[in-house]
Structures are given as C-alpha cells and as structure tokens.
Amino acid sequence: MARAWILGLALTLVACGGSDDPPPLTDGSTDGGGTDGGGTDGGGTDGGGTDGGGGTDGGGTDGGGGTDGGGGTTCTLPQVQCGATCVSPLTDTSNCGGCGVACASGEVCNGGACAGSCGGPFTDCGGTCVDTDFDPAHCGACDAACGATEGCVGGTCEACAGDWPDLCAGRCTSVMDDPSNCGACGTACGVSEVCNAGVCEFECFGGTDVCDMMCVDQDVDPTHCGGCGTTCAMGEFCSAGECLASCMGGLTDCSGLCIDTDDSLANCGACGTACGAVQECNGGTCEDCPGGEVVCGTSCKSLATDDDHCGRCGNECGGGLECRAGFCTAD
C-alpha cells in the first residue's frame, strides 16, 4: 500500500516561483509541512500529526505558515522563525527541537535534542554544537573561519569547483540540484517540490501520485481510486486501488477509509488511536522517536543528516549532495 510522503516539522518555505502554501488537499491526499531555514547550522522540528484522509497517513509534523508570533521575517532553510528571529533548532539551546524548548543549564543542543555533550557529527564550539567538516565559521576546528570566497569542504577551506561549483552562504553546492539554492543562492523550493536542473518542480513522494496538482494515494483515495478521477460509488471503499464493498488485504475501515493500523499515525493499532507528535507507529504500537528525530511520513528521521529529509521532511538533497547539519552540501 502506498504511503503518504511527508509532514514536515517546521515552517513552510517560500515556494520557487510563487505561492507560499503547499498544494491543495483532498481526501486521500498528503500534506507537506516543512522547515524554513538557511545561513547557519540548523533544522527545525515542531508539531503533531493526523491522518491525511483517504487512508494516506500524513504523519509527522507541520510547522504552520512560517511565523511563530512574529511577522515579516523570512527564514531560509533550515532555520525556523521563533518570534521575530530566525534560529537553528538543531543547535539553539533556547529553541532546541522547536521554538521555546530550552535546554537545562550546562546542556547543549545536539541535533535538535538537549544533551550533556555534543555527539555524532557535531563538535562543541563555545557551547554550540557545530559540524566542523562543513561549517564555514568553524572549518576543521572551532573559530577557524573560511575566507569570503571559500567554502568548507571536509574540514578544509577551499574554492568551490567540480560538481559543486557554487558558493552559497559559505558552503559549496550546486544550484542545479540543491533545493535550498535552486537556480540561485537563497532560492528555496517549496513543499512538494524538487530542484531539477536549477528549476523547482512539483513532485509527489512516498508512493503518491499527482492528480489535479494534488498528491493522492490512489490505493485508498475514494475520489482517485486506481487512477485520477476514478470515484467510488456511495458505500464503496477504495482498497488496493479498487472500489470494493469492504476493505481488503488486512486494512481496517476507519470512518469510511481503508487504513493499515500497523503503521497509521492517526489510527495506530485501532481506529482513532493517534500517536504523539514525535512518535511512529510500529506494528500497531506508538513508539518514541530517538532524541532529535522527527516523524516524516510514517517513520522517524533525522533532519540533521537524512539526505531525503534535510532540514525539513521531504527536502531531498540531489546531485550527490550530502545532508550535514540540516544543509545539502558537498560531501
């Protein structure tokens, strides 16, 4: 059964070429949340998750419309806006994993989770966890800043060249493939978009398909059952892409939708049993995500290091770029 692709955990980005909002939704379609960001180490986390309708589990988290009590500030991936300020939820001890989530005295924010020390790819530089392999202000070591025309690649300051010729905010990348810098530095693709040859293009994820510019799960969507525009009759269910009198294949009827309760965030183990904001449904049981991870689709992911969910759910690093500290950058 196809799965929903994403609900991002932070703020909706300004879409490439137009609207700030994700594509419109119908029953069976998927919702994409996201994080806004850019410029400094970061990646956002926030929010809850409900079933997207039509059996497509949105899961994950949705940060809303890009502000948190402020106004007018536009953050670039993977930072998020808390109040009137853009912050890094991966490293900010006052907003660790989400706005207003403060770490205790003596703790650091390590990849979006409060901890006693920095771990994984992060190094403690003055109480802030940074990735010295790719941070232009701490390249190879704390406070070792690269020059204005250099990027930090593997802990070394160097001129950008080869597959990653473009210098954007101190990092070597390719504007042909980077969804945070698509076509030009600072031009971020929106939710449900990928960067293809420098152009942001609408694309569905997680087994969903485009119908009328919406991402829908044709296995379970009664208005697009097995194909765009194929509507099931009154009283019928869409099960495995067919209009049937009842749900088949181990799926459960939850308010007229055929749901797999083994991994449905909104119907985990039974109809109406919803998992928490940072839990995944595993075999019909809600389980907590590891520290610093969020739910993207139906699974826990690290927005700091996951190449398919870099800085926000569904933000896929293309062209061989690697996700480090929430940025798509040269490996």
Image (tube, grey):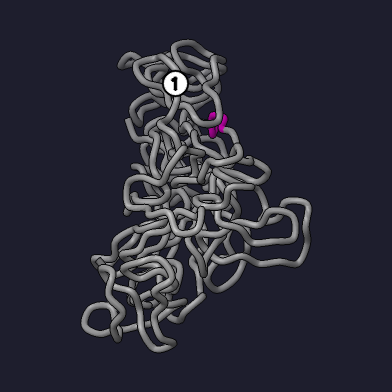
Say which of 159 and 236 sits in front: 159
Q: How many marks?
A: 1
The quadrant of the picture occupied by the N terminus is top left
| Residue sitting at x 47%, y 79% | 185
Location of the C terminus by quadrant is bottom left
The picture quadrant where one finds residue 238 is: top left
Q: Which residue is mark 1?
A: 258
Up the image or down, 276 lies above or below 167; here it is above
Q: Residue at x 49, y 33 (%)?
A: 59
Residue 50 within the segment the image draws in magenta: yes
User: What segment carries the magenta color?
Assistant: 49-53
327 relative position to 7: left or right: left
Q: Is residue 213 among what the camera can see?
A: no
Q: Position of residue 127 (x, y in %)?
A: 51, 53
Query: Disc 1 marks which amino acid?
Result: Cys
Q: Residue at x 47, y 28 (%)?
A: 55
> Callout 1: few (<14), some (14-19), or many (20+) C-alpha neighbours within 10 Å?
many
